[in-house]
């Protein structure tokens, strides 16, 4: 099929369970211009160069047609720093990082280890005596959402509201064009604004009654970069809350699915738990939670593999394709928890590299360590499982497993 239909095929839900043949086709074609005027990039070295290229913008205002990424810009609250360039991005990111991790709060994430392990054991303990389990609903979702809500200071009773808003935002990242596209984006925008307003109100309560949570820290921050405006705080908190659990849900679920398909490696990790950190890195390469970065834009004409990507054109970096580039990784379609030199794009790269990576790594390592002994008696009830609709944040919507006969 012609390469200018690759984006249409990649975003087609029919290919969600296995997009990797399409990613291989993309790599063979180099940079692929699409019928809608966007450019797809799927080779490792091209993606790495573009992630570090200051001429490539994350700000949709630099698009020739800014409305092609409306969720990042439209609405009453400002864009989160993920959709901005320096110096705006750098200032907001530094403020958000101060209470989150090193160098200003070096012990915050590591201090969560015991609590994360306890939550994981509590959730997995509910598997006892059950014949059928949904790994997503019963484990992979409640673990990270509980952690990020406690970290931010969101009451547990509000988690159902958070999930409803998050589902709308993620659904709006279904990039398949069609008559429902505008409705999805509008619903996602409304959900993002509702979540921002909720978090803004919660932060207002922390101004007079602070506690040991991230919202309190952000409200009372008086560092060298100044304080966040209320709108900036709403956008930042919304980003932290959504990104702080959605990608980890997919990473844990993709990990469980990968290991259930590979009993030998599952047994190897049970017998050699010291391999788990490497296994998490390999999962980030082999089945990453984020497959596409659809919001990049050249601020000037940029040459990519002898193709000129014009100023203002939508530039889509297919991270998951780069993660399996045979010119960078030996036997890239093989899951190898002992893989060396594993510089993947699981958390992006460049100045926008995910600063929540330490928390996601910790949660996934403890989650899989807890899951492995329980998976011994179970097998997949359906393979492939039903996937979520988004081609950007890719993972199973459900991962149903059944107890093996006689187990």
Image (cartoon, rainbow, N blue to C red):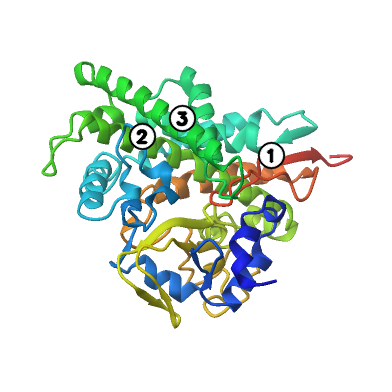
List the residue tagged with mark 3: 191
Q: Position of residue 143 (x, y in %)?
A: 53, 34
Q: Is residue 354 left or right of residue 274?
A: left
| Residue at image location 64% in from the left, 32% down from the top | 137
| Residue at image location 30% in from the left, 65% down from the top | 299
Which label's residue is closer to the chain start, 3 or 1?
3
Q: Which callout, 3 or 1, points to the residue nearer the camera? A: 3
Q: Badge 2 local density, few (<14 within 10 Å), some, or many (20+)?
A: some
Q: Badge 1 local density, few (<14 within 10 Å), some, or many (20+)?
A: some
Q: Report, in whole angstroms, how far the alpha carbon at label 2 lies from the one at label 3.
A: 11 Å
Q: Report, in whole angstroms, how far the alpha carbon at label 1 lies from the one at label 2.
A: 32 Å
Q: Badge 3 local density, few (<14 within 10 Å), some, or many (20+)?
A: many
* Residue situated furthest left in the rendering: 224
- For the residue pair 223 and 190, the one nearer the viewer reads as 190
Q: Are marks 1 and 2 in contact (CB under 8 Å)?
A: no
> Does residue 300 lie above or below 239 as drawn?
below
| Residue at image location 61% in from the left, 42% down from the top | 179
Q: Which callout, 2 or 3, points to the residue nearer the camera? A: 2
Q: Is residue 220 left or right of residue 346?
A: left
| Residue at image location 42% in from the left, 29% down from the top | 149
List the residue tagged with mark 1: 398
> Does residue 174 lie above or below 338 as drawn?
above
Q: Position of residue 182 (x, y in %)?
A: 53, 40
| Element on which disc 2 rests | loop
Which quadrant of the figure contains the C terminus? top right
> Does residue 377 lie above or below 148 as drawn?
below
Q: Report, in whole angstroms, how far the alpha carbon at label 3 lies from the one at label 1.
A: 23 Å
| Element on which disc 1 rests | loop
Q: Position of residue 60 (x, y in %)?
A: 35, 52
**Residue 217 visible in the shown view:** no
List the residue tagged with mark 2: 75
**Residue 115 visible in the shown view:** yes
């Amino acid at each position: 099929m012609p390469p200018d239909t690759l984006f249409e095929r990649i975003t087609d839900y029919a290919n969600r369970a296995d997009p990797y043949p399409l990613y291989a086709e993309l790599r063979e074609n180099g940079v692929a211009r699409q019928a809608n005027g966007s450019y797809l990039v799927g080779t490792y070295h091209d993606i790495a160069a573009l992630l570090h290229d200051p001429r490539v913008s994350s700000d949709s205002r630099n698009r020739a047609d800014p409305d092609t990424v409306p969720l990042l810009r439209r609405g009453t609250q400002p864009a989160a720093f993920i959709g901005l360039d320096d110096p705006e991005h750098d200032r907001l990111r530094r403020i958000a990082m101060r209470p989150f991790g090193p160098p200003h709060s070096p012990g915050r994430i590591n201090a969560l280890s015991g609590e994360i392990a306890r939550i994981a054991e509590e959730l997995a303990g509910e598997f006892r005596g059950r014949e059928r389990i949904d790994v997503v609903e019963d484990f992979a979702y409640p673990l990270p959402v509980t952690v990020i809500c406690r970290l931010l200071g969101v009451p547990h009773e509000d988690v159902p509201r958070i999930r409803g808003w998050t589902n709308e935002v993620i659904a709006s990242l279904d990039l398949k064009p069609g008559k429902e596209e505008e409705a999805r984006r509008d619903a996602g925008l409304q959900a993002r604004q509702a979540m921002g307003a909720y978090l803004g109100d919660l932060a207002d309560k922390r101004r007079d009654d602070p506690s040991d949570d991230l919202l309190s820290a952000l409200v009372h921050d008086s560092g060298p970069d100044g304080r966040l405006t209320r709108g900036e705080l709403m956008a930042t908190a919304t980003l932290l809350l959504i990104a702080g659990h959605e990608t980890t849900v997919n990473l844990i679920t993709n990990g469980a699915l990968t290991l259930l398909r590979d009993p030998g490696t599952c047994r190897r990790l049970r017998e050699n738990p010291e391999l788990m950190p490497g296994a998490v890195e390999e999962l980030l390469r082999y089945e990453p939670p984020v497959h596409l970065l659809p919001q990049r834009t050249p601020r000037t004409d940029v040459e990519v593999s002898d193709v000129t990507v014009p100023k203002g054109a939508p530039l889509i970096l297919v991270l998951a394709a780069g993660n399996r580039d045979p010119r960078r990784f030996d036997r890239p379609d093989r899951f190898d928890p002992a893989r060396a030199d594993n510089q993947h794009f699981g958390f992006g790269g460049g100045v926008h590299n995910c600063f929540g990576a330490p928390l996601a790594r910790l949660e996934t390592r403890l989650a899989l360590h807890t899951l492995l002994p329980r998976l011994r008696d179970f097998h997949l009830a359906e393979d492939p499982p039903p996937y979520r609709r988004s081609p950007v944040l890719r993972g199973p919507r459900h991962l149903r497993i059944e107890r093996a006969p006689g187990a």
